[in-house]
Amino acid sequence: MVSSNKFKKKYTVKVPKSIKILYCDKKNIITFIGLSQVKSLKLKVKIFLTPMSNLITVTNVPAFGASTTDFKNIKKVQGTTVAKIKQILIETTYTLYHKLNLVGVGYRVFPHEQLNNQLYLKLGYSHLIYFKVPNSLNTHCQKFTKLFLFGDCSFDSLTQTAAQLRACKFPEPYKGKGILHDQEKILLKKGKKI
């Protein structure tokens, strides 16, 4: 039985006209075909498609035989499904990118000449740090202190790679040196007063 909240506005997603949708009701898989990518999502709840207005409505009916704990958590699953659908729509519509800044004296990033997916990082250590970028991502270095990560990959893998790069040298709170996200501000601590 579908309750009255199936038509709530927060559980409906508007799909751009440039994206085609394929939905298999038996296996409960929805596929989005964009200009450059094709992404699929296995659903745990049923959905309604309205082709005339390009709307997807996520219901609170479980897709398969659900246990009592699944009925208790069905609102959480419903909200998570809406968020995943919105994220996949962004991934299929746009090319995602992430910008990192290297702040510090002598902090540099160098792309490898022969290997496209390898970076050399000079971060104030006595040695160079070698970082391998996944094949689904592309890199572009600008001024040796700015690094752009972009590609037709998922948002999760892009942010995961940016976080791994940032883990090579976290920004320290006294001088603010390290690898920073674009437009990130570091609140500096005061040092010891003499």
Image: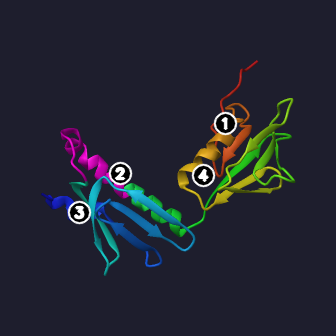
Q: Secondary structure at mark 1?
A: loop
Residue range (magenta): 64-82
How crowded pointer 3 is (Cα within 10 Å; few <14, some 14-19, many 20+) is rated as: few
Q: Is residue 51 above or below residue 175?
A: below
The main secondary structure of the magenta stretch is helix
Q: Amino acid at mark 4?
A: Leu
Q: Amino acid at mark 3?
A: Lys
Kindly tell me whether residue 15 is visible in this rendering: no
Q: Which residue is mark 4?
A: 158
Mark 1 → mark 2, Cα distance in angstroms: 28 Å
How far across and how far down the image is residue 135, in percent? 68, 53
Q: Earlier in the sequence, mark 2 or mark 4?
A: 2
68 left or right of 106?
left
Q: Which residue is mark 3?
A: 8
In the orientation shown, which residue stands out farthest toward the front? 26
Q: Secondary structure at mark 3?
A: loop
Residue 97 occupies quadrant: bottom right
Going 36% across and 61% down the picture, which residue do you hit? Answer: 29
Image quadrant occupied by the N terminus? bottom left
Q: Earlier in the sequence, mark 3 or mark 2?
A: 3
Q: Secondary structure at mark 4?
A: helix
Image quadrant occupied by the C terminus? top right
The circle drawn on residue 80 is 2
Mark 3 → mark 4, Cα distance in angstroms: 32 Å
Going 32% across and 52% down the picture, which residue do you hit? Answer: 79
Q: Which residue is mark 1?
A: 167
76 left or right of 30?
left
Mark 3 → mark 2, Cα distance in angstroms: 15 Å
Magenta stretch containing residue 71, yes or no? yes
Q: Tell me, yes or no, whether the two marked residues, 1 and 3, touch with CB atoms within 8 Å.
A: no
Q: Earlier in the sequence, mark 3 or mark 4?
A: 3
